[in-house]
Image (cartoon, helix red, strand yellow):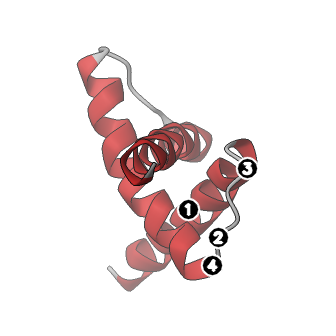
């Protein structure tokens, strides 16, 4: 259980960082973890709606990055 939590945080941090690089967003480690975790949830919903699935670690990171990019995009729309 603790290993799963740590793995989720690491995947969230990597995904949030990658999304920040893609979207040119300057954020810190905590915000990257948050973006990655929320992005994983959002990406999972979007991929399920589209009928797609993610397999393995790389697939999970891709889904999280796509979701985090969506979260950053929507946050920018709201704050402007």
The residue drawn where x is 62% and y is 41% is 58
C-alpha distance separating marks 2 and 4: 7 Å
C-alpha distance separating marks 1 and 2: 16 Å
For marks 1 and 2, the one nearer the N-term is 1
Secondary structure under tag 2 reads loop
For marks 1 and 4, the one nearer the N-term is 1
From the image, state whether disc 1 or disc 4 is nearer to you: 4
Location of residue 26 in the rendering, given as x and y in whole percent from the top left corner: 70, 65
Location of residue 14 in the rendering, given as x and y in whole percent from the top left corner: 65, 61
Residue matched to label 1: 11
Residue matched to label 4: 29
C-alpha distance separating marks 3 and 4: 15 Å
Q: Nearest the camera: 10 or 24? A: 24
For marks 3 and 4, the one nearer the N-term is 3
Location of residue 28 in the rendering, given as x and y in whole percent from the top left corner: 65, 77
The residue drawn where x is 37% and y is 19% is 52
Q: Mark 2–mark 4 contact, CB under 8 Å?
A: no
Q: Nearest the camera: 59 or 12? A: 12
Q: Mark 1–mark 2 contact, CB under 8 Å?
A: no
For marks 3 and 1, the one nearer the N-term is 1
Classify 10 Å Cα crowding around label 3: few (below 14), some (14-19), many (20 and above).
few
From the image, state whether disc 3 or disc 4 is nearer to you: 3
Instruction: Tell me, for residue 27, which label it has, or none.
Output: 2
Instruction: Tell me, for residue 24, which label it has, or none.
Output: 3
C-alpha distance separating marks 2 and 3: 10 Å
The residue drawn where x is 45% and y is 41% is 67
Location of residue 3 in the rendering, given as x and y in whole percent from the top left corner: 45, 79
C-alpha distance separating marks 1 and 4: 12 Å
The outermost residue toward the bottom is 2
Judge from the rendering whether residue 28 lies leftward or rightward of residue 6; answer left or right.
Answer: right
Q: Mark 3–mark 4 contact, CB under 8 Å?
A: no
Secondary structure under tag 3 reads loop
């Amino acid at each position: 259980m603790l290993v799963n939590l740590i793995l989720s945080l690491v995947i969230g941090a990597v995904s949030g960082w990658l999304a920040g690089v893609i979207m040119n967003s300057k954020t810190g480690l905590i915000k990257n973890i948050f973006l990655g975790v929320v992005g994983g949830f959002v990406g999972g919903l979007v991929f399920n709606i589209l009928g797609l699935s993610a397999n393995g670690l790389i697939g999970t990171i891709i889904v999280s990055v796509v979701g985090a990019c969506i979260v950053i995009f929507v946050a920018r729309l709201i704050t402007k």
